[in-house]
Amino acid sequence: MTRAFTGTYRGVSSAERREDRRRRLLDAALAIVGTQGLAALTVRGVCEQAKVGPRFFYEAFPDLGALASELLLAVQRSALDRARTAIAETEGAPARRIRAAVAALITELTDDPRRAKIVFAQAYGDEVLMRTRFAGMRSVAATIIEQTRIVLDLPEGQDAAVAATSQLITGGAAELVLVWLDGGLDVDRDGLIDLLADFTIAMIDRLPAVAGRLNGTA
């Protein structure tokens, strides 16, 4: 009688080992790209950092572009999840909840400077990462739309206004953070959060007027 092969070794399944290798590759990519830049990312370098053989790299990712894109998406998703949680856990006026979300988002992205560098700086100049960055910005905009409707209980018929406002907030905020990271804005992180929160609140406060103009009623 033969024993069925389960793929389990020392209590760890093959699926768990694959996920562990994938996680180590992503962590290694964060360490390399976040400190040396995207140009420094190589299969050999990331495998050495992760202590994973090249064969297992290609088991997890088809190429370096896929690895970098997955890393960027993971950072973006983590920040968005933290912002959603902040809104859900904050009571009071809409402005207070919006400020909490902005603070959570920026804190998540800048607590580790490597994460901020990947989200706001490293995508430029790389076509694959730029597409991923744009997809991430659309996700942020969609989250703003979703949460704005929850926080403000907006009536129907303001879709165009909400969509335009969310894109302006997302693009403007991303560029301002990039300038701040580059040393072009002389404020600390709390000051940056205040600026972004004030901007976001002001834009959202203008939603009824923008909607009226787009609908021809203002």
Image (spheres, rainbow, N blue to C red):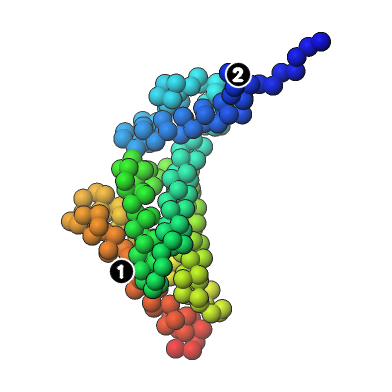
Left or right, residue 195 beside residue 14? left
Query: Mark 2 and mark 1 in contact (Cβ < 8 Å)?
Result: no
| 1 or 2: tag closer to the N-terminus | 2
Left or right, residue 197 beside residue 75? left
Left or right, residue 44 beside residue 18? left
Q: Which mark is residue 198?
A: 1
Q: Residue at x 59, y 22 (%)?
A: 11
**74 in relation to 33, above or below:** below
Identify the amino acid type marked 2: Tyr
Q: Percent from the top left, x then y, of residue 202?
A: 34, 73
Between disc 1 and disc 2, the foreground one is 2
Label 1 and label 2: CA atoms lie apart by: 54 Å
> Dividing the picture into quarters, in which one does residue 102 lie?
bottom left
Determine the secondary structure under disc 2: loop
Q: Which mark is residue 21?
A: none
In the rendered image, the quadrant that contains the N terminus is: top right
What residue would you read off at disc 2?
A: 9
| Mark 1 surroundings within 10 Å by alpha-carbon count, few (fewer than 14), some (14 through 19), many (20 or more) | some
Could you say which is closer to the camera, residue 44 or residue 107?
107
**100 in relation to 25, above or below:** below
**1 in relation to 140, above or below:** above
Q: Is residue 129 visible?
A: no
Q: Residue at x 43, y 25 (%)?
A: 50
| Mark 2 surroundings within 10 Å by alpha-carbon count, few (fewer than 14), some (14 through 19), many (20 or more) | few
Identify the amino acid type marked 1: Asp
Q: Percent from the top left, x then y, of residue 107?
A: 33, 52
Q: Residue at x 43, y 53 (%)?
A: 82
> Dividing the picture into quarters, in which one does residue 37 lie?
top left
Outermost residue toward the left? 186
Q: Residue at x 34, y 58 (%)?
A: 103
Q: Percent from the top left, x then y, of residue 178?
A: 30, 52
Outermost residue toward the bottom? 217
